[in-house]
Image (cartoon, rainbow, N blue to C red):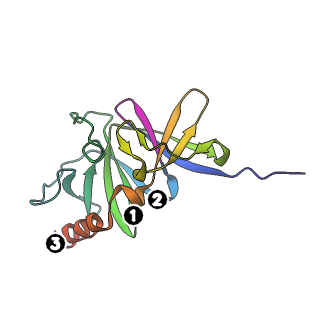
């Protein structure tokens, strides 16, 4: 009898000491941090917009979204451009480390809270040899209302 191992390819990134993963299917590109134009009257975690190859892209600071203390950007800081419900959004992370295949057998449902991050944001936790990888559910990181607000920013810029 043969078994088919299913795996998920993820982009691994870091915020503080924790490692996170998002499905490579949702990632459009990984960019160096660049000047961000602040947009008034937006939630604090929305840092503003960038013009990325002619596309106005809202930028979200995941540290602020997850209520993690802010940190100065450095040479490792990256913006991961992801697609969430047909909209491109940039996520500021401390570093983007790796692309990895994770076997579905190694992914467990998320606990209620991981490092202060609500379970709603999480797809699961991958157990790797000596580390844990927190898999984000990008469709939950931003609520429907927040996505609508970001679309307004994108259209108004």
Residue most extreme to the right: 1
Residue 87: image quadrant is: bottom left
Give the x, y percent position of residue 4.
Answer: 77, 53
Q: Is residue 132 left or right of residue 74?
A: right
Mark 1–mark 3 distance (CA, rounded to whole Å):
19 Å
Placement of the C terminus among the 4 image quadrants: bottom left
The residue that label 3 is drawn on is: 156
Residue for point 63% across, 41% down: 106
Assess whether residue 83 is covered by the magenta stretch: no
10 Å crowding of disc 1: few (<14), some (14-19), many (20+) = some
Residue for point 23% across, 47% down: 34
The residue that label 1 is drawn on is: 84
Q: Is residue 94 left or right of residue 23?
A: left
Of the numbered discs 1 and 2, the one sitting upstream in the chain is: 2
Residue for point 53% across, 30% down: 131
On screen, residue 27 above or below 154: above
10 Å crowding of disc 3: few (<14), some (14-19), many (20+) = few
Disc 1 and disc 2 in contact, CB within 8 angstroms: yes
Residue 144: image quadrant is: bottom left
Mark 3–mark 2 distance (CA, rounded to whole Å):
24 Å
10 Å crowding of disc 2: few (<14), some (14-19), many (20+) = some
Of the numbered discs 3 and 2, the one sitting upstream in the chain is: 2
- Magenta range is 15-21
Disc 1 and disc 3 in contact, CB within 8 angstroms: no
The residue that label 2 is drawn on is: 26
């Amino acid at each position: 009898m043969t078994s088919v191992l299913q795996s998920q390819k993820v982009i691994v990134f870091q915020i503080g000491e924790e490692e996170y993963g998002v499905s490579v299917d949702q990632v459009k590109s990984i960019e160096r941090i660049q000047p961000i134009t602040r947009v008034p009257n937006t939630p604090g975690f929305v840092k503003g917009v960038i013009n990325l190859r002619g596309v106005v892209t809202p930028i979200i600071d995941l540290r602020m979204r997850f209520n993690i203390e802010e940190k100065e950007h450095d040479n490792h800081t990256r913006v991961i451009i992801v697609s969430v419900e047909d909209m491109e959004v940039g996520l500021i992370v401390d570093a983007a480390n790796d692309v990895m295949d994770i076997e579905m057998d190694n992914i467990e449902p998320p606990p209620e809270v991981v490092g202060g991050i609500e379970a709603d944001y999480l797809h699961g936790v991958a157990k790797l040899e000596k580390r844990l990888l927190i898999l984000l559910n990008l469709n939950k990181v931003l609520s429907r209302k927040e996505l609508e607000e970001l679309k307004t920013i994108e259209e108004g810029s």
